[in-house]
Image (cartoon, coloured by chain):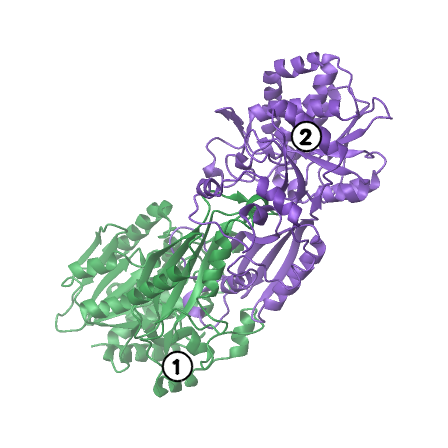
Chain colours: A green, B purple
């Protein structure tokens, strides 16, 4: 065991260099023009697995982006852990807000800045490096391990579920290990046992067949941008309560136990608010900020566009207006049902003077993991040893739809062992990952495997 | 007189060539990166005036774009006509909707396609060519003429009014002649005697100090795009009635005479609707489509933006959202008062969870010209001779704020002698101007000067 720890400690520079190489690859899945970056990132991971001389390491083609797979069986009687991660990243725009370029990883004050640093390249990499540390240091690996890395997480994993369905035996496991979440706070390890689901929609409003002069036609022709604003305004009330009929029907309300757990979490609301530069927070009455952000469903406009967005003034009555709108869902809600309710409601709000089209981008079910699961306990012990602190059990507001899918298809629960921070600015400019947590992540992963059997 | 007509007829190809040269210049005033195009267009016009050997032709610098001035006095006892036009153009985007490039003028089916073809390069050019036809054919020019061409009409003429104020003597005249409007329909000449005013505003809503992950923060932080939609939704009701308190207070209602004039205008509402690709028109109850578009005030979103607008889905809770919103005004309304009412109302709708900033782009007062004015009668006679049809007297929905300013500062009424068509797609992709109307415009202008004294 001491050889293992030594190897982890003395290999830091090497691990960092490899991570930088990984982060240089612009593997943006939301934009087809980055196809090459996607493939390069998959090949990079495959090469890392091949280097370890596993029983199996290969790249599976799908109708979308490739899936990287690896496998090492040490003793079939021991537990098998399936490590899941994603090598694709969010688009980096707005580019001008980045202090250093998103695909030129830069270390500042102990943090590594790059798109994907925390979400999810830096985090998934900890588990490969943990396994490497066992094998390179000659420490017997105590369990069986499988890796599955996809390149479509940021676009809703459209080909992962079909892949799991057709490879149930290949992926058979006792638990899934995922590092794609954040710790509760710096030096405050936490294990996420609940995730919100997602229904991501797009609404397009089309009026006249071309952009019109607003002076010549204004007043006589319905304006699609005004109509869109009116529709959006009717989706939520002033208190943040979603107005879509049936939206809350299946929501599991928080139990007294849940609320007690929330109350135990250290949370400085003033600091949270100030860090965001806000005068006031806002949300559903009767819920705390943490509850609103993690255990309550909600609806947000993610994007909005119409007409002239340039400098100065253009007197145009736009032909079209569009919005991306997503809803976060909580246990009990089904993303397919919610998408249908959304569509029905938006269509019911559309006047006959325009054409309103609702499309569904992607969705995922919410998920909750059993707090008594032995995998969670091993993870908690590993965290405690490395961080010298008992981890908290929390729920997160984000979505990892695949957690619900793994449960359903492989009958296995997930352990969400997050090493990131909420301040990592994932999906924002200047995404980062603390190098200290990258190294502690490798240590925690290594110890987890030891405590598992 | 026959030499004059001969000259106009035999010079068509030359006039067209010169117009094409003029249209090639990308003189976009809303975008500072086109400064060079602006200057080039001004220089082009100056050269055209210089070629005519007027008493005076020069370029006046302002704090913005230059003003081109020209002057020819034949007999101080005769009327002086001040010809106004603008050499700046609207931005051409969205570029991908143009069939041919906006600054590569192309003739198809007798129409010349280019940004500025109708608004206003093609139209202003008719008067220069009319004067040239007198001078080149040796026909005595029957009145005195002055030219003033500005390069900031599309951004609200910020430096024209100060210029007029400080050059009242230079610009002293008996009437202003402007060709920057459309005929009622093809081969249906019309003289616009009323114009709407404009108040063009921008609203910015700022929430958190950076784009956030909508999963992590959604539900606990107010979304600026949702707030903006809510504000916009409260500016107009479902019937198109503006909800800003005090907005209609000073509006001059249509008289019975006005309504009679409207009823006489030939108008095919079904054809109008179908041409726009609409299932239904829309607007204030109790008014016809033409009245709504020309004699009633209104409010339109001209642009809208927030968050992620790219392909696919990005789960962002945007930091900012913005909109360009303009109001068309009718006689009685003061654009400065309306801008203040707008600001006050929008600010009153802003919740304390975000910061809402209202800025004013530009504005202009509405205007109506006296139907008994002798200049209007000369214009009507000129139209009738060239088009073989008595012109209609109409009001337009667009704004030429300078018309109200000329009246106020120079005490002179304007004659709006439009040669364009409403189908010219000004401010839209594929702007065009019928060459036939370009030539008839030159003829009409020439005859107008003859009938004036």
Label 1 CA crowd tier, 10 Å (few <14, some 14–19, many 20+): some
**Relative to B429, residue A260 above or below:** below
Total of numbered circles in the picture? 2
Residue that carries the numbered disc 1 in the rendered image: A389
B173 or B384, which is in the foreground?
A: B384
Asked whether residue A107 is in view, the answer is: no
**Relative to B192, residue B124 above or below:** above
Determine the residue positioned at 50% across, 44% down.
A211
The C terminus of chain A lies in which quarter of the figure?
A: bottom left
Q: Which mark is residue A216?
A: none
Determine the residue positioned at 80% across, 29% down.
B80
Q: Does label 1 lie on the same chain as label 2?
A: no
Percent x, y for residue A164? 20, 61
A67 or B139, which is in the foreground?
A: B139
**Protein chain holding label 1:** A
Percent x, y for residue A82? 23, 66
Mark 2 against mark 1, which lies toward the viewer? 2
Horizontal side, residue B433 vs residue A9: left or right: right
> What kind of element bears circle 1?
loop
Horizontal side, residue A439 vs residue B378: left or right: left
Residue that carries the numbered disc 2 in the rendered image: B380
Label 2 CA crowd tier, 10 Å (few <14, some 14–19, many 20+): many
Asked which quadrant contains residue A246, the reply is bottom left
B337 or A292, which is in the foreground?
A: B337
> What kind of element bears circle 2?
helix
Percent x, y for residue B267? 53, 40
Asked whether residue B402 is in view, the answer is: yes
The N terminus of chain A lies in which quarter of the figure?
A: bottom left
């Amino acid at each position: 065991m001491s050889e293992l720890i030594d190897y982890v400690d003395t290999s830091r520079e090497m691990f960092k260099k490899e991570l930088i190489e990984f982060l240089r690859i612009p593997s943006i899945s939301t934009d087809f023009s980055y196809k090459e970056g996607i493939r390069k990132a998959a090949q990079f991971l495959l090469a890392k697995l091949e280097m370890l001389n596993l029983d199996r390491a290969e790249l599976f083609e799908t109708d979308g982006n490739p899936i990287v797979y690896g496998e090492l069986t040490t003793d079939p009687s021991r537990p098998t852990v399936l490590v899941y991660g994603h090598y694709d990243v969010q688009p980096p725009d707005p580019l001008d807000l980045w202090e250093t370029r998103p695909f030129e990883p830069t270390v500042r004050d102990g943090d590594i800045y790059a798109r994907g640093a925390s979400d999810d390249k830096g985090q998934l990499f900890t588990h490969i490096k943990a396994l490497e540390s066992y094998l390179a240091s000659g420490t017997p690996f105590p369990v069986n391990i499988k890796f599955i890395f996809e390149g479509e997480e940021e676009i809703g994993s459209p080909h992962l579920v079909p892949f799991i369905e057709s490879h149930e035996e290949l992926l058979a496991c006792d638990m899934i290990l995922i590092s794609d979440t954040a710790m509760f706070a710096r030096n405050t390890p936490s294990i996420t046992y609940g995730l919100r689901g997602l229904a991501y929609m797009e609404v397009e409003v089309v009026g006249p067949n071309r952009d019109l002069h607003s002076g010549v036609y204004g007043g006589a022709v319905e304006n699609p941008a005004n109509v869109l604003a009116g529709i959006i305004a009717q989706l939520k009330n002033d208190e943040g309560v979603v107005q879509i009929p049936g939206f809350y029907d299946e929501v599991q309300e928080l139990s007294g136990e849940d609320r007690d757990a929330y109350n135990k979490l250290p949370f400085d609301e003033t600091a949270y608010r100030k860090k965001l530069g806000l005068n006031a927070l806002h949300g559903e009455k009767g819920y705390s900020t943490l509850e609103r952000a993690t255990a309550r469903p909600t609806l947000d406009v993610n994007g909005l566009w119409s007409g002239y967005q340039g400098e100065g003034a253009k007197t145009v009555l736009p032909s079209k207006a569009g919005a991306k709108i997503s809803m976060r869902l909580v246990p009990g809600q089904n993303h397919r049902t919610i998408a249908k309710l959304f569509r029905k409601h938006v269509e019911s709000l559309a006047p006959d003077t325009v054409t309103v089209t609702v499309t569904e981008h992607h969705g995922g079910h919410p998920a909750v993991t059993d707090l008594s699961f032995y995998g969670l306990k091993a993870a908690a012990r590993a965290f405690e040893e490395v961080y010298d602190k008992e981890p908290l059990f929390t729920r997160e507001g984000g979505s990892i739809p695949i957690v619900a899918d793994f449960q359903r298809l492989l009958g296995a629960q997930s352990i969400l062992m997050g090493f990131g921070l909420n301040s990592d600015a994932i999906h924002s400019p200047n995404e980062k990952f603390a190098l200290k947590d990258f190294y502690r992540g490798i240590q925690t992963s290594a110890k987890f495997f030891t405590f598992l059997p």
